[in-house]
Image (spheres, grey):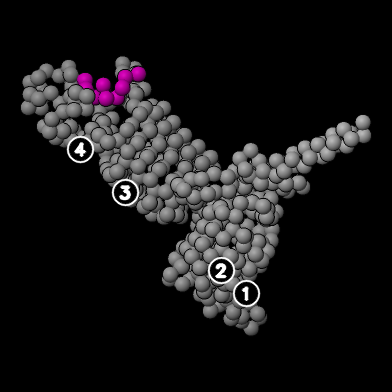
Amino acid sequence: MHLPAALLLLLLLHSAESGRAARHYGARGHPWGGGKVRRQAQECKEYIEAGEKYLDCQDQQLTTVMQDWPTDIQHLLLARNKFQVLRDNMFSQFTRLKSLDLQQNDISMLEDGAFAGLTQLTTLLLQHNGLRTASEEMLLPMHRLSYLRVYDNPWNCDCALDSLVRTMQLPSNRNLGNYAKCAEPLSMRGYKMRKINVELLCAPDRDGEVPSRPQIKVKPEVTSICRTYLFPKPLLDCSSKDLNHVPSGLPSDIVKMDLSGNNIKHLKPQQFLMSKDLKLLNLSSNSLQHIDTAAFAGLLYLRELDLSNNSLHNFQYGVLEDLYFLRKLSLGNNPWICDYNIHYLIYWLKHHPGVQYSGLTCAEPDEFRGWRVEDYVKTYNGECPKDRQTGGIDVGWAGLGGTDTDNEAQEVMGD
């Protein structure tokens, strides 16, 4: 009786050890262990996109990295956690890392060797933290770093910051530290670190203060309102921010921009002029009523435009002329008025057959409510006597087809 009991006890112990080993890796192979912080790591998502490995540990209340995370990851997302101090060699095991996202933490201190071992890193995001000072030393291990964001930190622009500012201002480092500004001393508050005169950082006046310079009025930038995400594609998220206008200072390297859910009623000319790389623009749910000609100037590569759920009646002539490569246009849930002014939109769509569009339904007048706008345009001249139509030619477009003469006639109408 004693032998079977002993065997049973051994089996139970073995089962318990196996259970602990199984919990060490989650259902998707994500490692975690005991302790309060480690249990939260079970929410990390490991995935592969475009052949590269990501570990997404955002919003996990983490204060440090886990030593049993996979070391072959190439992109580590740690935004909106509770990191406060980045210690020496904190990320040294992630030797294949290409991007590190630490924005929106509580980071107030960087040790010089915090990024040691990250020789492959090209992108480092440290915006929206509590950094006041740092030195060039922290950048030295990252030989390939080409993209550094450190704005919205309370930088103290004194002599301790001299080496970092000089590095940022090198012509070859044009994407290091964009938008970052001094918070202290008072005489330099609001000045961009990439533009500041570095000779003033270590040149105190008689009272030990940095010589004051005339203050300039600095407009609020989009970086203080919106969130920026770089992976998998650069995205500027300004959705649901109670904006009544397109924010100024739009980054030039953004591929996707989300301005939905705001209160932007009017698009003025050239507001997106600097966003030359933009491919997707979402302006849905804005109560948008009017779009000026040249509002989309500069958006040469825009592929998708969402204008749904607004208050648009028609498009002013020329509004769409800058969108050479547009492929998708969402127009649903707008009160389109089917009268003479709607013709420009149909005319433009006819000459851009590669554009997929949706949502063009007449809301007014009552006699055409519910009609497709294209069907309304076909019948616009349907009741006119033939001898009153231009040159005796029917200028209605069957299925948006039409002849060259039709096109010329309609273009004149549009003008």
Percent position of residue 88, x then y: 66, 66
Q: Residues within 10 Å of mark 4 (few under 14, many from 20)?
A: few
How far apart, in angstroms, are the residues tagged by discs 1 and 2?
A: 20 Å
How far apart, in angstroms, are the residues tagged by discs 4 and 2?
A: 61 Å
Percent position of residue 287, x then y: 45, 34
Residue, x 59% and y 58% (percent of image)? 94
Task: State which quarter of the image contains the N terminus.
Answer: top right
Q: What residue is disc 4 on?
A: 415
Residue, x 36% and y 50% (percent of image)? 270
Q: What residue is disc 2 on?
A: 141
Q: What residue is disc 3 on?
A: 300
- Secondary structure of residue under mark 1: helix
Mark toward the viewer: 4 or 2: 2
Residue, x 26% and y 31% (percent of image)? 346
Residue 267 or residue 325, whichever sits in front:
325
Q: Is residue 279 above or below residue 382?
A: below
Which comes sooner in the sequence, label 4 or label 2? Answer: 2
Mark toward the viewer: 4 or 1: 1
Residue 216 in view, yes or no: no
Percent position of residue 263, x then y: 49, 38
Mark toward the viewer: 4 or 3: 3
Which comes sooner in the sequence, label 2 or label 3? Answer: 2
Which residues are drawn in magenta?
A: 370-380
- Secondary structure of residue under mark 2: loop
Q: Is residue 286 above or below residue 250?
A: above
Residue 136 in view, yes or no: yes
Look at the numbered discs 2 and 3 and tell me whether their residues touch, using CB distance below 8 Å: no
How far apart, in angstroms, are the residues tagged by discs 4 and 1?
A: 62 Å
Going by the numbered disc 3, the residue's amino acid type is: Leu
Instruction: Say which mark, if any, is on residue 160.
Output: 1
Q: Residue furthest bottom?
A: 206
